[in-house]
Each structure stands twice: as C-alpha cells, then as structure tokens.
Image (cartoon, rainbow, N blue to C red):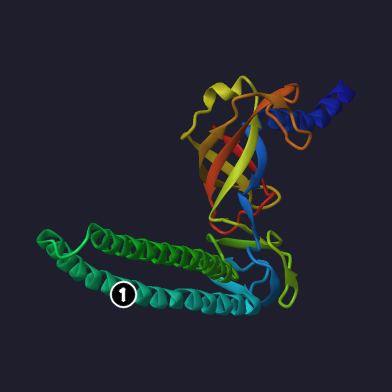
Amino acid sequence: MKFKAINLFMLLPLLALISCKGNEKTSDAYGNFESTEITISAQATGEIMQFCLEEGNQLTAGQVIGWIDTTDLVLKKAQMTAQKEAITSKTASLDAQIAVFQQQKTNVLRDKERVEKMFRDGASTQKQVDDITGQIDLIDKQIKSVKAQETSVYSEAATVQKQIAQVEESIRKSTIINPSEGVVLSKYVNAHEIASMGKPLYKLADLREMKLKVYVSGDQILQVKIGQEVEVLVDQDSKTNRKMSGIVSWVSESAEFTPKIIQTKEERVNMVYAVKVLVKNDGTLKIGMPGEVNF
C-alpha cells in the first residue's frame, strides 16, 4: 500500500500537466504575414546621374528619387526644333506666292469684264474671251498647287512636332519618380550605373496594412466570410501572444493541398482553403512573421 501511494503521488504532477495540455486552446488557423510588393523599373536608357534611396527608406507617392542622363535627348530635341522651324518657314514663301497669284487673278478678272463688254459690243472676238477665261483657270490651278504644297509642309511640321513630343516624354521618364507610398525592400542599382529600359531599380512594399495568409480546413471554411472581423495573434514573447484585429479580405474558391510550412487545426486534413486577413500595421509586423487567427 505504501508503494502504491508513493507511485500515485509521483503521477499527480504528470496528470496535471496532461490535463493542462489538453485544456490549452489552439488557434483556428496559422500562417505568415505578407505584403503586396512592386518592382520599380527604369523607363529610360542611360547613366543614372542621381539615385537617392536606401533599403528601409519610407517613400511617398510622387517623390523624386533620381534621374537618368538626358544629354542626348536634349540635343535631339534641339535638332528637331530647328528642323520644325525650317519647315514652317517655307509656309511664308508659299503664302507670298499665293498672294501674287491672287493679285494676278484680280487683274485678269478686271480685264475679263472689259473683254466681255467689248464682245457684247462686237469690239472683241470669242477667242479673246476664251483666252482670258483660260488665264483665270490657270491662275486657279496655280493657287491650288501652292496650297497643296502648303498642306504638305504643315503635315511635315506636325510629324516633326510629334517626334519632339516623344523626345519630351522620354526626357520626362528620365526622372525617376516613386509611384506609390511604401518602404524600400531592395535596392538594385546605384548612381553612375547604366540603366536600360525595363531594368529593375528597387522593390517597394506598402507596409501600412499587412496581409496574414492562413489556411483553414473544409469544416472551418463555413465560418469564414469576406468582411468578417477576426482576432489575430502575434508573438509578443516566447510565452505570450499579442492580440490584434483583422478583416477577412479574400477567401480562395478552391481547395489545395496543405503547404508543409503551415500548421492546421487538424493535422490530418489534407485539403485546405487559403484565406487572407488584412491587419493594420502598428510598425511591429514584418514580412514573413508568423501569425494566428481565431474566427
């Protein structure tokens, strides 16, 4: 009897531990925090003259980060501008030609009136009338020809203007402007390196709101709705969790096999659904940090 009492006394702590372990509450789903990352690429080709950012910098939308050398583009624009001015100057000469022909036509029209009057009085012939009418027709054709040349000149000038506009757009794109607010995750280039169209410059992520991607079983998915407010737990220390609030923003329409790195409420579940929960970042949440969710 004494031996049995001692054994029972020794088993009590173990039984208490097992009892506590059985009562320990586990979360409904587990996963990791992620964010939407965008890679900003160069929109021009040339030497990067200035590039002012470092990894970890907080950037604002519209912030100028640097610029790519535009010397060749500026010279090209100057050349095209001079070309356009030379083309446009032709119109002054054509306008002068049209003015001369118009004056000639005015003079011939006066002569025509006199000839027609003389013809009615029998003092001129039909040939004289026909000749002066032919002169007017000729002058009209000459005016039409010069106007066609003028139209061609204007069209040529408009084409050069479009080319100038393209160069101006390339010059504008040579200024590296940050498109949206976020934190620099990676920096791929430095000043005085050569950039080419589409070359990645840096990676950006908006960390003001993080997404906790978790996986739930088929039984749990019935509890989850988009827009639902849920409890989010993150590690505060090795023993305790910190509670935060989150909103379900996305639920997968199809099941997938359980990822190896993800725990589930029931480890025997093979098929799970991905769920994303939006959580406002107070500055402590990091990409890849583990989190838990209770629905």
Residue 267, horizontal then vertical, whole percent:
74, 26
From the image, which quarter does the N terminus lie in? Answer: top right
Q: Is residue 290 left or right of residue 113?
A: right
Q: Residue at x 62, y 68 (%)?
A: 57
Q: Could you say which quadrant of the image residue 7 lies in?
A: top right
From the image, which quarter does the C terminus lie in? Answer: top right
Q: Is residue 102 left or right of residue 123?
A: right
Above or below: residue 289 compared with residue 249: below
Above or below: residue 216 compared with residue 243: above
Tag 1's secondary structure?
Answer: helix
In depth, the one of 169 and 127 nearer the eye is: 127
Residue 285, horizontal then vertical, whole percent:
61, 54
CA neighbours of label 1 inside 10 A, class few (<14), some (14 to 19), many (20+):
few
**Count of numbered tags:** 1
Q: Say whether residue 26 is visible.
A: no
Which amino acid type is shown beneath numbered disc 1? Ala
In depth, the one of 141 and 183 nearer the eye is: 141
Above or below: residue 28 compared with residue 47: above
Q: Residue furthest right?
A: 3
Residue 289, horizontal then vertical, whole percent:
68, 49
Q: Could you say which quadrant of the image residue 50 lies in?
A: bottom right
Q: Is residue 39 left or right of residue 11?
A: left
In depth, the one of 58 and 28 nearer the eye is: 58
Q: Residue at x 29, y 62 (%)?
A: 131
In depth, the one of 181 and 292 nearer the eye is: 181
Residue labelled with disc 1:
99
Q: Residue at x 31, y 74 (%)?
A: 99
Q: Say whether residue 48 is visible.
A: yes
